[in-house]
């Protein structure tokens, strides 16, 4: 059952029960109040009849004479009330009013000084039956009266029916209001539920609207926060998956191009008689593309090994690094550094510097100089590789460390390299807790810099 | 002579395609990026374009939009072998695709098939007194029809497309029977012998020791 129906039905049930109980109590108390009044009146009437009877009996009986039964009957006749009965000591009726119809059983409880009464039904009418003892002269007689109280009961039934009608109307109003209220109260739940369904169908950007500041609003807020978290994680996973997919696609492309050349030229060599020049060309391509495959697989291996590697940084004198660079690139590279020792893995750091320098040289025109510098920079030691080459377009700066990404896509230019160098450098520096800072101006050159912690005792 | 434009940024691949298509009798022109290709297409007509998908400048898909109105048949060269990439290329109007790495035989076969579809390639090829009709799937020797089975016809077509080239048994098997060659099948030898007999080509279809066969034609 829906929550709004639950609220609606339970409220309705409570209101209905409350209305009937209070109506029952109200009508009954009104009824018993009027019943009490009527009873008091009936007893009063009984009392005044007794008094009238006593007076008449005293008047009608000479002094020191007993009161005769015939006299009692005669006096009974003179009393105006037609609903009376007068009985003797043995409870035998001495006078019965014309309309009086009742048993004698009430007389057994009537005693001197008190009056008894009961409610009885007779011929579809409700009657109030009173009985009291009358002691007059030498006799102890019983005087009974009947009083028709049917109208009281009729009134009570009337009240009940009126009350029922009023209750029904009230219930109608209450149900309308309750329904509206329950629908209004459960609106955030339905909204939340609709949003959840939409999200389940894949629309993860959907958020619930906060319409109140109560618990519902808090729930909605919590839900939205949860959704934000989930979406973030989903996006992150998607991004990772896409990066992996891109890597595989790029790798496949990088692998297949040299493979095609190797297979194709080898196929030519084996199945065709070629002249000297073509045979040399084919062999040359097989050799060069084979070499490219080799460097690709080596770089890839570096990357994979790097990802699994943990290492202990040890103190490295920067002079060994810079001297190695100067030896590796004897021409067009100017090395300039201040002494210092950094915490690093020397072989990996060497790879970074060689890669960066090599890239800088490739970006430079023949004869242009590349500057490799190092100096103490606050708590760290800063390495900088600067060239005056062609630069990197601004929009490509953020992508440049992606695997296989190359600014110069036309491999036709005859440049070597597989597009993994900067990726590798970024990976190595990440292991060292550092990162590259690349700034570049088109046509002016590129500056790549990173900082490593120096040895503690040197600080 | 049919003119072929090769659009590919890898010089090695360009040379590979050019050497082989030239040997098969095509006139080849090569450009190394998409923009040059578009420039070239403005003033020169080609019968076929071999188009690499990943290109500097404008990529193959972008270039395709430019080529389609020209009505020149296109074969995509791609390193992506996934179905959706191939479907994308074909949907964009390419006539065929070639997945790297590819065999020379496959390159030539696809080029000829596409050209034939455009009624540009040779429909009838004559070698000596043998006339091969690729469309009618019929062969005549000295004017008289020769009855060949489908596999024998396929073999003959392959030999004629690759004149004076040694065709390896595995290549013949893979192209004609379209299955993987396991090295122990005598099927190829059997069919070549029957083909020789039917055409009287004992001297033309030469056995190349340990390799396969070569159709020798004087050029």
Image (cartoon, grey):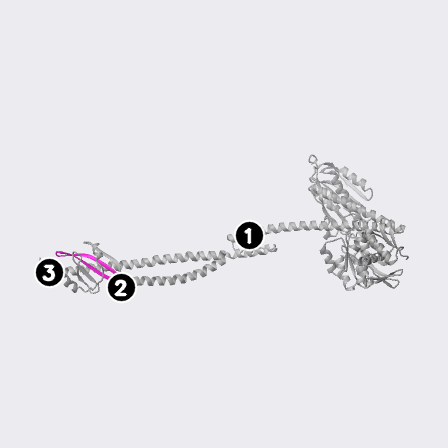
Task: Using the image, tell me which numbered label, if any, was put on residue A61.
Answer: 3
Tell me the element at label 3. Answer: loop
Q: Nearer the viewer, mark 2 or mark 3?
A: 2
Could one spot residue A413 in this view of the protein? no
Q: Residue furthest top?
A: A457
Relative image position of residue A393 (x, y in whole percent):
74, 52
Q: The numbered mark 3 sits on a residue in which chain?
A: A
Q: Is residue A326 in the magenta section? A: no
Q: Which residue is mark 1?
A: A221
Q: Which residue is mark 2?
A: A123
Q: Residues within 10 Å of mark 2 (few under 14, many from 20)?
A: few
Q: Earlier in the sequence, mark 1 or mark 3?
A: 3
Q: Is residue A147 in the magenta section? A: yes
Same chain for marks 2 and 3? Answer: yes
Tell me the element at label 2. Answer: loop
Q: The numbered mark 1 sits on a residue in which chain?
A: A
The image shows a total of numbered marks equal to 3
Alpha carbon distance from label 2 to label 3: 38 Å
Relative image position of residue A42 (x, y in whole percent):
23, 60
Nearest the viewer among B34 and A158 is A158
Alpha carbon distance from label 1 to label 3: 100 Å
Task: Using the image, tell me which numbered label, if any, was put on residue B202.
Answer: none
Alpha carbon distance from label 2 to label 1: 73 Å
Which region is colored magenta? A121-148
Q: Earlier in the sequence, mark 2 or mark 3?
A: 3
Q: Residues within 10 Å of mark 1 (few under 14, many from 20)?
A: some
Same chain for marks 1 and 3? Answer: yes
Q: Is residue A204 left or right of residue A167?
A: right
């Amino acid at each position: 059952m829906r929550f709004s129906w639950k609220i609606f039905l339970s409220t309705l049930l409570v209101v209905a029960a409350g209305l009937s109980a209070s109506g029952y109590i109200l009508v009954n108390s009104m009824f018993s109040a009027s019943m009490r009044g009527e009873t008091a009146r009936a007893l009063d009437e009984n009392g005044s009849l007794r008094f009238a009877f006593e007076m008449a009996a005293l008047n009608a009986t000479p002094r020191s004479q007993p009161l005769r039964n015939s006299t009692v009957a005669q006096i009974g006749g003179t009393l105006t009330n037609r609903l009376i009965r007068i009985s003797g000591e043995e409870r035998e009726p001495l006078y019965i009013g014309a309309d009086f119809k009742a048993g004698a059983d009430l007389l057994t409880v009537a005693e001197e000084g008190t009056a008894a009464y009961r409610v009885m039904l007779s011929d579809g009418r409700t009657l109030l039956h009173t009985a009291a003892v009358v002691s007059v002269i030498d006799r102890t007689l019983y005087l009974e009266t009947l009083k028709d109280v049917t109208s009281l009961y009729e009134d009570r039934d009337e009240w009940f029916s009126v009350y029922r009608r009023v209750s029904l109307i009230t219930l109608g109003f209450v149900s309308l209001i309750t329904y509206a209220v329950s629908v209004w109260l459960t609106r955030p739940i339905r909204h939340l539920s609709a949003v959840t369904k939409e999200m389940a169908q894949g629309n993860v950007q959907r958020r619930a609207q906060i319409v109140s500041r109560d618990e519902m609003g808090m729930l909605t807020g919590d839900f939205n926060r949860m959704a934000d978290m989930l979406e973030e994680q989903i996006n992150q996973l998607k991004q990772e998956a896409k990066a992996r997919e891109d890597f595989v696609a790029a790798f496949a492309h990088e692998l297949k191009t040299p493979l095609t050349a190797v297979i194709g030229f080898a196929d030519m060599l084996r199945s065709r008689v070629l002249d000297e020049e073509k045979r040399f060309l084919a062999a040359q391509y097989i050799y060069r593309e084979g070499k490219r495959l080799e460097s690709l697989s080596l770089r890839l291996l570096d990357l994979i090994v790097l990802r699994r590697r943990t290492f202990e940084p040890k103190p490295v004198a920067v002079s060994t690094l810079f001297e190695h660079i100067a030896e590796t690139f004897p021409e067009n590279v100017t090395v300039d550094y201040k002494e210092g020792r950094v915490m690093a893995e020397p072989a990996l750091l060497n790879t970074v510097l060689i890669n960066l320098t090599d890239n800088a040289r490739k970006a430079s025109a023949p004869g242009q100089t590349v500057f490799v510098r190092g100096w103490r920079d606050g708590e760290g030691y800063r390495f900088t590789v600067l060239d005056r080459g062609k630069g990197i377009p601004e929009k490509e700066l953020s992508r440049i460390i992606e695997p296989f990404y190359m600014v110069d896509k036309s491999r036709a230019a005859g440049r070597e390299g597989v597009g993994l160098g900067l990726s590798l450098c970024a990976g190595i520096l990440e292991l060292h807790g550092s990162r590259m800072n690349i700034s570049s101006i088109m046509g002016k050159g590129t500056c790549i810099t990173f900082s490593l912690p120096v040895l503690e005792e040197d600080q | 002579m049919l003119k072929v434009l090769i659009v590919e940024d890898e010089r090695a691949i360009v040379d590979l395609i050019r050497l082989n298509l030239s040997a098969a009798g095509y006139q080849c022109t090569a450009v190394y990026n998409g923009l040059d290709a578009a420039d070239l297409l403005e003033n020169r007509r080609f019968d076929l374009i071999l188009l690499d998908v990943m290109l500097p400048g404008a990529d193959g898909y972008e270039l395709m939009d430019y080529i389609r109105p020209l009505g020149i048949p296109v074969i995509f060269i791609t390193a992506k072998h996934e179905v959706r990439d191939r479907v994308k290329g074909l949907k964009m109007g390419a006539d065929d695709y070639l997945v790297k790495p590819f065999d020379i035989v496959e390159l030539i076969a696809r080029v000829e098939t596409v050209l034939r579809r455009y009624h540009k390639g040779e429909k009838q090829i004559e070698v000596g007194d043998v006339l091969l009709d690729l469309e009618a799937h019929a062969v005549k020797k000295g004017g008289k029809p020769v009855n060949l089975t489908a596999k024998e016809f396929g073999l003959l077509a392959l030999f004629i497309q690759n004149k004076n080239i040694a065709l390896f048994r595995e290549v013949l098997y893979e192209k004609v029977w379209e299955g993987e060659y396991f090295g122990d099948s005598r099927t190829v030898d059997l069919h070549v012998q029957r083909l020789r007999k039917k055409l009287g080509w004992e001297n033309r279809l030469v056995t190349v020791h340990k390799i396969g066969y070569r159709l020798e034609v004087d050029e």
